[in-house]
Image: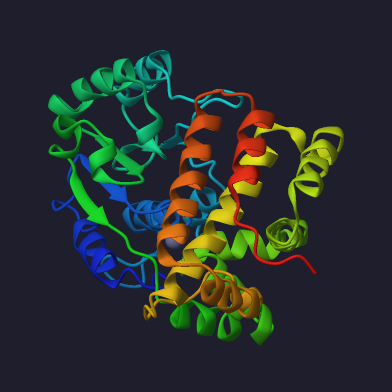
Amino acid sequence: MQWNILGHETAIRFLKNHAIPGKTRHAYLITGPEGVGRETLALAFAKALNCQNPPEKGEFCGVCLACRQIDEQRYPDLLILRVNEGSKDLKIDQIREMQQKLALAPYQSPYRMVLIPDFQRATIGASNALLKSLEEPPSKALLILTADARECLLETIASRCEVLRLRPSSVETLERYLVDEKGIAANRAKRLAHLTGGRVGTALSYDQTQDLLDAYDDALTDLGDLLNSRLRERLQFVEKLQKGKGSSREQIAFLIATWLTFWRDVMIRREGADIPLVNIEHEGRVNETAQLIPSRQIKKMLKDHEKALVNLDANLNPRLVIENLILTLPLLQVA
Ligand SMILES: [Zn+2]
């Protein structure tokens, strides 16, 4: 059986070689944007290291007890250390507790493995604590970190890991994969591939949540309406948002992040760049807006939306943030 993963051929070849006894290192760092398949790759590597019935060197069977337990994330020698629910950061106590386990002998595997997804969320204290495990790893220890980018981590950590950098697939490749391998209808596959910019994990999770695609459409419809509304209607929109369910920080962040993808698309069309649109379903409106607004103003919109997201993150009042943003939107035409 092949690793059965879309793309990432170089990384897979690399890890297959490292899954052979004697070739395995103590620490790996898999980087790439969220939803690109970092964790899937890490788990495949764990299977290749532990499969009881490998069909070939560096491969795994996918059906033995070890393979199944790793898939279900309940393999006794694999600890997956995540940020605690409700918390933003990975804490130093979690790292210390993990280190005590890491020092024990494995139950059945050649390794005591720890996977830490999203290590960019570790506090400085947690990062420094982890350094110890990287500088003097217990003999059977194997650490796999994932992160958005190498630059998000202390260089002293990254430099002690084998670093594998993952990129999204092309939109066309993902679209074909979703149709051929996942049986998703062609139209939907096209939309998911564009919306996620070729990130397979995100596409599959969007496919499972119809509400999310609807929310995306609603957000873009709202923006279209606002661009054609004068001040009074815009303020009414903010008012309505405040009373409705859409008033939480997360929901407003979603709204603004979605609008940002629209402005990026508008910029792509305005500049005639050969880059696939994110909102392929709204291509007509994207083209129309690109014709009506000069580049300078589109750039300002991009900046304003990015700044609004930063402000939300910095705990500014969500209502003020969205109100400010809406008032700076250009007025296209009033029907
Ligand atoms: Zn197996």
Nearest to the observer: residue 138 or residue 118 = 118
Query: How many circles with numbers are drawn on the protein?
Result: 0
Q: Is residue 226 above or below residue 1?
A: above
Residue located at (49% from left, 45% from top): 304
With 179 as the anchor, is 140 left or right in this view? left
Ligand 1 position by quadrant:
bottom left
Residue 76 % position (x, y): 47, 36
The N terminus appears in which quarter of the rendering?
bottom left
Residue located at (53% from left, 55% from top): 260
Residue located at (32% from left, 53% from top): 49
Residue 45 % position (x, y): 34, 55
Can residue 4 be seen at all in this image of the molecule?
Answer: no
Nearest to the observer: residue 50 or residue 193 = 193
Residue located at (74% from left, 63% from top): 221
Can residue 64 be seen at all in this image of the molecule?
Answer: yes
The C terminus appears in which quarter of the rendering?
bottom right
Nearest to the observer: residue 246 or residue 86 = 246
Q: Is residue 294 above or below residue 22?
A: below
Residue 187 % position (x, y): 67, 84
Residue 250 % position (x, y): 65, 37
